[in-house]
Every structure is written in structure tokens, then in C-alpha cells.
Amino acid sequence: MGGRNPVTWLGTPSFPKAAHDALGDTQLRRNLRKATTTIRGKRASAVAELADWERLRAAGAAIKDDVLANLDTYLVRLEEAVTARGGVVHWARDAEEANRIVLDLVRAEGADEVVKVKSMATAEIGLNEALEAGGVRAVETDLAELIVQLGDDRPSHILVPAIHRNRAEIRDVFRRRMAEPPASDEPGDLAEAARRHLRRKFLATKVAISGANFAVADTGSVVVVESEGNGRMCLTLPETLITVMGLEKIVPSWPDLEVFLQLLPRSSTAERMNPYTSVWSGVTPGDGPRRFHLVLLDNGRTATLADRVGRQALRCIRCSACLNVCPVYERTGGQAYGSVYPGPIGAILAPQLVDDPHDEQAASLPYASSLCGACYEVCPVRINIPEVLTHLRGKVVEAKGKRTPEAVAMAAAAWMFADARRYEVAQKAGSLSRFLARDGRISHLPWPGSKWTSSRDVPAVPKESFRAWWRRNRG
Amino acid sequence: MTGPRVALFATCITDTVYPETAKAVLRLLERLGCEVDFPLAQTCCGQMHFNTGYHDHARPLAQAYAEVFAGYDYVVAPSGSCAGMVREIHPGLAGTGPAVERTYELSEFLVDVLGVTDVGAYFPHRVTYHPTCHSLRMLGVGDRPLALLRAVRGLELVELPQAEQCCGFGGTFALKNAETSTAMLADKMRCVQDTGAQVLTAGDNSCLMHIGGGLSRLRTGVRTVHLAEVLASTEEEPWAAATR
């Protein structure tokens, strides 16, 4: 096993460089501002309706923590329950193994095309590309995923992967790639074109691939929640269903599921309840797929679980509330993060799944945050994202060693702060900056100060610090 | 004096760059009957080091803080960010203790400990207030600063649109991701200017240095003034436009 974890995209530059391009994209900026501002307001209203929201959040976090602490037990319980109901469970330690298992299963069915339910786990492992290389075409059936796929594009949001596209761009993509292109860029026409395109696939395709939002260990029931009903088509029409599921998606029992079915839609789409909730337990003769395979995916999760602080990222239920409130995400969009997991959750999850301290791009992600804490405030499972960000920054610093210019400067600052007398000498030296100032402000500093003064003045350090004043007047 | 014995934790940025803010805290607290000391051994809470990932450098600063501020009834900082660092992060770095437990951000101290919202201030300007992220979300100061501002005579308080959005400072974030930081700042400045306020106030000089640096660069004419300076201002001793 081994090789590169496809959770981050090969060739993506580090975050500040990728953000540079995104910040200059006026269409992207407008789309993102509009979309995130709207969903932020709606989420806040949907959440405000529940008097026990904070207790639900605490319950969600507690259930997930219990699952993570006893994963060995629950995984075996799930496997037994799925097997008892006629499903087949496969274990995949990484992307490569998961992709091979799925490809072999599809080949065994003699299929050269599969329909897909929107799924983060299969995007994380680059399943579509792996199937393609094996001669199998994967058709995304979620409207936004379809837009991304037909546009040879990359996703930029967990829930709304085509959030960066407007309807004129979507019309152009559909015109290029569909047998019956849309009449106009009116939403109704775009949806109709997608519907006709997909109906043919649903009726003709023998194998479907899905992810899972939850799996109930007690009964082996797998749950997918969605808005469009296209997922329901995939989950019921084909003869064979293959589900790829991150091994942290387990909930112990049905009463636990109730908590998450309240937390997820309100956090995600700002709905009280999502339109389609599909649940299946193994196979049921005469109803739905005749063969069911469940692929349990590790791909860096057990390594993440070993980190006392970082493991809380595994509570994530992929709602994307943290993306929608993040001031950084709102301005750079998701592709700048170089991963299927963008935004605050991506900044803590992707580097942990990559688990390579020398990967520059992954190492830049924990710094893609002002630590404003808006993400933590909305997270339905109370992931303390700022805490994990600073924790992962610590690991980045450790890996880079003590000789980088930044590490040297930080060591010097720490030495200066360690002694009030040295600190006071530094203050006096700093106050010489007033000779660079005009009207008390400085507009140009040499590197690295230039990173500040490129857009902001900096006040001159006054001649007398407070402590000097205190000593003179009160000492 | 019979008032509480309060140590002023000026924070390194206020001590060095904004001494007028520290003088304002001193004046304000003494006016309200506190006995204020400024322990000269204080330096920095270690936030820059910690938030950038240099946890080993932050640890001794947290230890020093605990020693320097141990012997007081209260420690008051004119910064939500530094008070947040002390209360939320120091325990994990160097354990908790009296200094950590008795540390308050200024507006918390005034409202919760001294029990005042009208501090007898006079500030005849049109003012808008930016709730800085750490005071808002780490400490949860809520509308304490607004309650204090509403009681200031002569002050016309105007609501800042999208107030709870980060200004883009984020410590070393402003350097490491300077362009994204600037994009966030641009929107914050637009909101500030939309209010028509003359003065933007907040409880953190670091965020004010960031927003103020942008407002100054664009010659908007809007001044940034720390909440302590607004509250310290009186008819007898009004705030004077110091160099900022």
C-alpha cells in the first residue's frame, strides 16, 4: 500500500499562492459572497427555532466521542449486522486499496458505467479517476457534482461543490456536454436538462456507488440524506450498490441517529428536515439492489484518532456550516485549499489525513485562518477548530525545525520577552521607528514588514512606552 | 484606598505602541475607586508565539505571567485577545492559578466586577463599535461594551453592519496571508465607512491597529480609539486626538 493520499490535489500551490488567484476572480468573489451570506442567515434562523440547540450540539459531540473511543467495538458490530442482513463488508486501509476493491466489484458485475450518489469519501480517494483508469465511467448524479464533473472542474464546497459557478457558466458546460442541452440559463431549464440527462442513466445503469452520512451499528443500517432525490434513484434502481464509508461515520443506535438528523439539515441546508432520507439494511428481496457491498475506509483516520487534540476533527458530519461562516473561505473559495475538504474543517482534516509534515501545501492549511472562531461557534458537533488549528501549527513548526527565518525571529522575540529589561531595550530601539514616520504613521517597511505595509499603515512606536511613563510618574 | 487591588496587564502592544490606552485604563479604574498597580516585570502573554505554532516559546511566558500577577485581587487587560489567551490557553500551557483565574478583559471587569455601566464618561462623537473576535467568541463579553458606550454622555452610537465578521488581523495571519487579510479588511472598512462614524472603537488595540492602518492608508479620516480611551474621557479631561 502507500503512495500519495489523494485527499489533497497534486500540483495545488500552498494556500497563500492559491488564494492570490482566487482573490482576483471577480465572478468567484461575487458568487461566494452572495451564497455564503444567504446561507449564513438561513442557518441562523433554522437553528434559532430549537430551544435545545446547544444541548443537541453537546449530545452530537458526546455520541461521536463515544464512537471514536470505542471504534473497534462498533466497527465489528456494524460488520456483523450488515453481514447478517445479506451485505458484504470490505475493509480498506487507504485510497488505493478502497479504489481497487470498488473497481474489482464493478468489474465482477461486468459494468462499464456506474451512477454515483454525492459522496465525500469517494471524492477523497479519487475514486472516479481510479475507475476511469480501469475503464469504468462514473456518472455523478448530484446536480452540483454533475456540473463539476461535466466542466472538468474541481469542487469548491462540501455541500454545494459548484458554488463558484453561476448559471451562465453552468449553461455553457451543459451545452458542451449534453445530448439535449438546456434552452436557456433559467434554473428551470438547467434542472430539466440535467433531469433528462440523468434519467437515462438511472434506468440503464446496473451498479451504483454511494457514500454514507451515518451507519447504525446495532442494525447495520446505512443512511444517506440529500435534497434532490437523485441519490434515492441510485440507491433503489440499480441491481448492485457499493457504499464507501469513512469508518468514523458510525452511530451506535437509532436513538443516536435522531440527534444527527436534527443537527445536520439545519446546519447544512438550513432546513428543518432534508427532503430525502434513505435508509437500508443489507438487502431486501424484491426491494432495491440485490447485492450490497460496504467498504469501510480508513485512509488516515486511525492515525488522526491517535492525536489527542486533532481527533475531534473525526466528529465532523460534513454539514459545511463552518465553510459558510468562514471569512477566509468567503473570499478565497474552496479550491484554494487544494482538497475536497475546504474551509475550516478542511484546514484541520486534510493535513491530518495527508499526515506528511513535509508536505508544503498541507502545512499551509492550518495557517489559512485568522482564528476568529466563527467555525467553532456554528459547528453542530462542537469541533474546536481554532484549537486544532493552533495544535497543527505546532506540528508544522516542529517539522520545519529551528533554522527557518521565522523560527529564528520567534526565538529572538521569545528571548526578548523572557526578561523585562531586554524587552524595555527593544521598546526603546523600536521607538526609533518614529523617525520613519510621517504624521505618526509609517507607510513602507522592508520585508517582512512590507507584507503589512502593502495595504496598511503602521503607527510609529512612540518615544515613551507606558512602562517608562509609569516609572517616571508612579515608580 | 479601600477599593480592590488591581494589576494592570497592559499587553505588549499597548505598552509599546499605544501607551495612551494604558494611561486611560489607569485613569478610569482609579476614578472608579480601584487601587491600580503596574508590575514592571510583565511583558507578553505569548499569544503570537502560541498562535503561530511556537508553543515551547509561549510556555515560559505563561509561567512568568502566573508569577508576576499572582498577588492581586484582579488583573485587568485592555484586550479581549490577550485576556482570552490567558484564561483559555495558559491553563493548558502552564496550569491554572490565581493570576489566570482573576484575569479580566476591561469591559468584563467594569460590568461584572465593579458592577457599573455608567462610568461617568463624556465623548461627543459619532462612534461605531467593532466586537473583536476573541472578546466576542473566546470570552463571550457580549454586549457589555455596548452597554458601557450607551451610557457615555454626548456619544452617538451607530451600529456597525456585519459587526461580527473578523477584520482580517489574526496576528501573523495578516503577514502569512496578507492578501486574504486585506480582502477581509476592505469589507470591514466599507462597513465602518457606511456608518458615517468619526470614530471606530473596540476592545483590542491589535485589531484597531489593523483596521486603523487601512483607514489611515486610504485617508478615510475615521479614527480608531480604544474603548478604554472613550470611557476615560470626561468633560474635565476630554479625549484629545492623540497621534494614531
Image (tube, coloured by chain):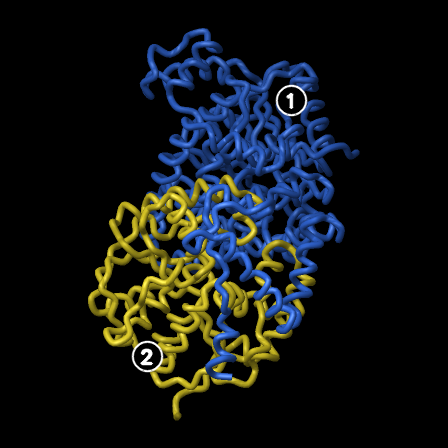
Chain colours: A blue, B yellow
Q: Quadrant of the N terminus of chain A?
A: top right
Q: Nearer the viewer, residue B208 or A244?
A: B208
* Identity, as a three-letter code, of the amino acid under mark 1: Glu
Chain of residue at mark 1: A
Q: Secondary structure at mark 1?
A: helix
Q: Is residue A187 left or right of residue A313?
A: left
Check residue B115 in the rendering and tell me which mark sits there, or answer none: 2
Q: Name the residue that disc number 1 marks.
A: A129
Given residues A180 and B223, the one toward you in this image is: B223
Residue B226 x %, y %: 38, 63
> In the rendered image of this protein, does residue A341 appear above or below residue A255?
above
Q: Establish whether labels 2 and 1 are both on one chain.
A: no
Q: Residue at x 45, y 49 (%)?
A: A457
Above or below, comparing residue A42 to residue A235 in the picture: below
Q: Secondary structure at mark 2?
A: loop
User: Residue A313: percent from the left, percent from the top?
Assistant: 59, 49
Report the residue at 50% width, 39% height from top.
Answer: B179
Residue extending furthest toward the front:
A435
Task: Locate residue B208: give its quadrant.
Answer: bottom left
- Kindly identify the amino acid type of the residue bearing the numbered disc 2: Gly
- The residue lying toward the viewer, choosing from A92 and B89, is B89
Q: Position of residue A431 (x, y in %)?
A: 54, 62
**Residue A274 placed where, x, y %?**
39, 38
